[in-house]
Amino acid sequence: MGQTLVEKILSAHAGQSLQAGDMAVCNVDVCLTQDGTGPLAVRQIEKLGIEGVKNPEKTVLFIDHAAPSPRKELSNDHMLLRAFAEKTGSQLSEIGDGVCHQVIMEKYLNPGELLIGADSHTCTGGAIGAFATGMGSTDVAVGMVFGKTWLRVPETLKFVINGTLPLGVYSKDIILHIIGMIGADGATYKAMEFAGETIERMTVPERMVLPNMAVEAGAKCGLIASDAMTGKFMEEMGRKELFTLVKADTDAVYERVYELDAAEISPTVSFPHTVDNTRTIDHDDCLDVSIQQVFIGTCTNGRIEDLRIAAAMLKGQKIHHGTRLIVTPASRRVYGQALREGLLEIFNDAGASINTPGCGACVGVHQGILGDGERCLATQNRNFQGRMGNVKGFIYLGSPATAAATALAGKLADPRKYL
């Protein structure tokens, strides 16, 4: 019997052939924590009385969720992570280096590897044919010190997307469409495998949006086979020699296969307070919805490709006088690219506020907390009540193009009218 992507990768890390439903102990290649979850992991390791970590070169501690720190308590947690990295030789990603899921792809993760992270959106790594999943801090702590973790092999839902995306439609619209279709619990503890000619034409940064948001449908992971596009990305990141082809067998068995026509997908928005509460932008519910804040960034849509899309729409324009725009590049690398290409100047001239690379407004700790009753259109992955720091705020999700159009109009706007 053939194997799906997740079965194939986990089998290689368990040293035995696995199928969906099997339990296995797997070797871990990469571990990550961030400043919200890392302190608990470090304290658990200290409770175990263990001094080091199994693989310090591939154990990465990120300071990205509250960066720079807005409170002394968080500053003390940052100090704890810095001290642990110094003591164990683990890698430290400092303030301004960027969001963990972006940086782990730029510097550490390779096709076919197994990544565990103390953050739910660790599944982003599946965009290059790796198994990547989020776990609790204690589970990740064990993986850090022993280099192993236990897993139940998930069943796989396959999404085959063919055809050409229409003007103004991007990978963010695809995943919002899918989650709206199957529901926020439609893939609970499943693997979501994305395939088809539409996916094959996407760059890795475009693909990253899909597994990133797989967890918003309850999935254990999201996966895309590695291919020539993956090889190009690995070369750009300086790890060409670590590229490998990883793909599912042609006779792999899936729990269910969904087939989608890319041409039928429209710009899509998630309404408060769940990701699966979706509407196409031309729906009557989207008419005259005033927006006080627009946020472009995060591990979902803070890459250079996203900033280019938004900047092209904003060039020579001014944002609506009643709407503020926050732009937060996903990493220092992205920030540098945007700086060299003049994108930050375009955002600044349009009236945007440009923040330090990191999670920014998405996590609701600082940098863009909403006021009572305010509405935000964000390119992030999550819009539950209170996500941006205020339970009385309202979060809508959309693509960078939808975000730029909304910033110009001061209300939910169709990006196709501005392209």
Image: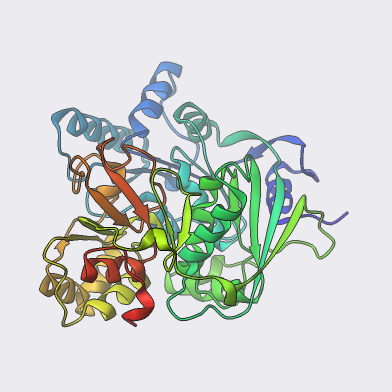
- Residue 396 vs 412, above or below: the answer is above
- Residue 282 vs 54, above or below: the answer is below
Q: Position of residue 376 (x, y in %)?
A: 27, 53
- Residue 326 vs 382, above or below: the answer is below
Q: Nearer the viewer, residue 174 or 153?
A: 174
Rendering colour mode: rainbow
> Which quadrant: the N terminus?
bottom right
Q: Residue at x 16, y 70 (%)?
A: 319
Q: Residue at x 79, y 43 (%)?
A: 16
Q: Nearer the viewer, residue 353 or 324?
A: 324
Q: Residue furthest front?
A: 284
Residue 53 shows in this picture = yes
Q: Is residue 127 left or right of residue 327?
A: right
> Which quadrant: the C terminus?
bottom left
- Residue 56 vs 353, above or below: the answer is above
Q: Is residue 253 left or right of residue 213?
A: right
Q: Position of residue 280 (x, y in %)?
A: 47, 64
**Would you identify the image quadrant in which residue 68 lies?**
top left
Q: Nearer the viewer, residue 224 or 60?
A: 224
Q: Residue at x 27, y 79 (%)?
A: 313
Q: Residue at x 76, y 53 (%)?
A: 256
Q: Position of residue 325 (x, y in %)?
A: 19, 61
